[in-house]
Image: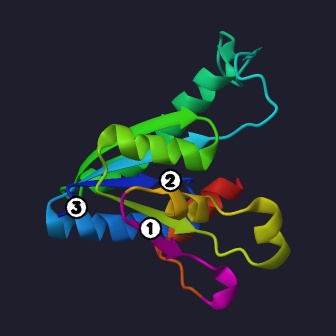
């Protein structure tokens, strides 16, 4: 049924919750997961060079961002592989929703499993919803997994560790 699951990942708690659903689906159905991260840096010259901290040579912004995202995805992939799931990682830059839809087409995804932050009111109006855009335009089913801390959703230890790591 669902042989290829696209799991867009922004390293948030909601993405980790979606990862859990995708992993369960993959184990149950024998599916593979394609982890995907899309970086959107509007207004930034992605071809510009900068000196990453701790590195000897300058790097192009786009190359550095994509490389860093792939490294972070590989951490997630390693945990999924330890559960016996086949996982590949893809990272790119661009407008997030269209890039996710393009990835889904390119890999032949049968389903997209993604987290949603559950923003409401002004935050939703100003920031929009990537998940909403994907749902409206996807050619395959989309399973959204909501994470809303204010609604008392309990984080797993893994989600708490990831959130703490992201907070610095």
Q: Nearer the viewer, residue 81 or 106?
A: 106
Q: Nearer the viewer, residue 101 or 139?
A: 139
Q: Is residue 7 visible?
A: yes
First to last magenta residue range: 140-152
Can you identify the residue that label 3 sits on?
Answer: 2
Q: Nearer the viewer, residue 168 or 9?
A: 9
Q: Residue at x 51, y 56 (%)?
A: 137
Foreground mark, 2 or 3? 3
Q: Secondary structure at mark 1?
A: helix
Position in image of residue 164 (x %, y %): 64, 62
Position in image of residue 105 (x %, y %): 37, 43
Can you identify the residue that label 2 sits on?
Answer: 9
On the picture, is 4 further left or further right than 91? left
How far apart are labels 2 and 3 at the CA level?
A: 19 Å
Q: How many residues crowd mark 2 within 10 Å: few (<14), some (14–19), many (20+)? A: many
Q: Residue at x 41, y 55 (%)?
A: 7
Q: State the quadrant of the N terminus.
A: bottom left
How far apart are labels 1 and 3 at the CA level?
A: 16 Å
Indicate which disc, 2 or 3, sits on the residue closer to the N terminus: 3
Can you identify the residue that label 1 sits on?
Answer: 18
> On screen, 24 above or below 81?
below
| Residues at circles 2 and 3 in contact by the CB criterion of under 8 Å | no
Q: How many residues crowd mark 1 within 10 Å: few (<14), some (14–19), many (20+)? A: many
On the picture, is 130 further left or further right than 35? right
Q: Residue at x 19, y 65 (%)?
A: 27
């Amino acid at each position: 049924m669902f042989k290829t699951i696209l799991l867009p990942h922004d390293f948030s708690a909601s993405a980790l919750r979606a990862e859990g659903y995708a992993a369960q689906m993959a184990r149950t159905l024998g599916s593979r997961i394609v982890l995907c991260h899309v970086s959107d840096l509007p207004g930034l010259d992605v071809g510009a060079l900068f000196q990453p901290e701790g590195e000897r040579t300058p790097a192009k912004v786009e190359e550095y961002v994509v490389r860093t995202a792939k490294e972070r995805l590989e951490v997630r992939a390693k945990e999924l592989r330890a559960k016996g799931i086949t996982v590949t990682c893809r990272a790119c830059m661009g407008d997030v929703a269209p890039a996710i839809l393009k990835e889904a087409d390119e890999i032949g995804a049968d389903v997209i499993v993604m987290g949603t932050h559950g923003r409401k009111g002004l935050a939703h109006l100003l920031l929009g919803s990537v998940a909403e855009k994907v749902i409206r335009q996807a050619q395959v089913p989309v399973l959204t997994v909501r994470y809303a801390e204010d609604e008392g959703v309990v984080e797993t230890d893994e989600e708490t560790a990831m959130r703490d790591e992201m907070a610095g």
